[in-house]
Image (cartoon, rainbow, N blue to C red):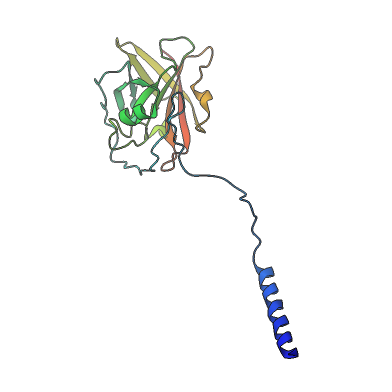
Amino acid sequence: MFRSLTVSLLLVSLALLGLAALPAYPRTETASVQLHPTELETPRTLLGENPGGEKADPGRQASANAGAGSGGTMTLSVPKLGLEDVAVPTADSQVALDEEGIIHLKDSGVPWQQDSNTVIVGHAIGFPRTKLTYVFYELDKMEPGDEIVVRDEEGKEYVYEVYDRMTVQPEDYWVTYPEPGSEIISLQTCTPIPTFENRLIVRGELVS
């Protein structure tokens, strides 16, 4: 019996030593970073991008004349991105963006208004059903001094010069607000590929 008690005590001691050697883990998470894209479906929000996390195909770029002549209140040309006279319909929903590939955010500014911030949102990749895919796939290549051209329905031209590029959170709605004393344009897409968790904004100021 004494021998059995000794063996039992020895086993208990070994078990306690084993537990002491295990690493200590916190009971609660110390970080809550989620790499899932935000799905936004309500109007007047910064719009989402590819919840499925589709991978980009660099060989499938938007063509130089993609979307030309298909209607819309304005057209967009960005020589750096190979875009020329792309029709930009006005809308405020994720559904419209997924269908068109590019939209002018309703109730944001237009180039012919004073103190305006013309917000144009485009997919970096898009979906199989999207009319214009990859429209802003290379938006991150825009640099200060690059040209952005908008034309109204009558063909009047508004030329912007890029002066800023920033990455913001989906809830940073302030990027849609006007800047008093300036007429600007904000081109927006989602970044980085393939998580699309943030928003890339390229801004230009009206120069002519």
Q: What percent of the width, then of the height, locates residue 96?
A: 34, 27
Q: Residue at x 33, y 10 (%)?
A: 156
Q: Residue at x 40, y 23 (%)?
A: 92
What is the residue that sits farthest to the left in this orientation?
Answer: 69
Q: Is residue 10 above or below residue 58?
A: below
Most distant residue in the right direction:
2
Residue 150 position by quadrant: top left
Q: Is residue 93 above or below residue 7?
A: above
Q: If the image is split into quadrants, where does the N terminus sit?
A: bottom right
| Image position, residue 35 (x, y; %) | 49, 44
- Residue 136 at x, y = what percent? 37, 32
- Left or right? Give the position of 66 relative to 178: left
Number of residue marks: 0
Nearest to the observer: residue 182 or residue 194: 194
Quadrant showing the C terminus? top left
**Is 190 placed left or right of 5 in the picture?**
left
Quadrant assignment, res 196? top left
Residue 158, visible in the rendered structure: yes
The residue at 70%/77% (across/down) is: 12
Q: Most extreme residue toward the front, as rendered? A: 1
| Residue 80 in view in this figure | no
Asked which quadrant contains residue 50, the reply is: top left
Of 143 and 117, nearer the camera is 117
Residue 119 pos. (x, y %): 43, 21
- What residue lies at 47% left-to-right and 9% top-to-bottom? 114
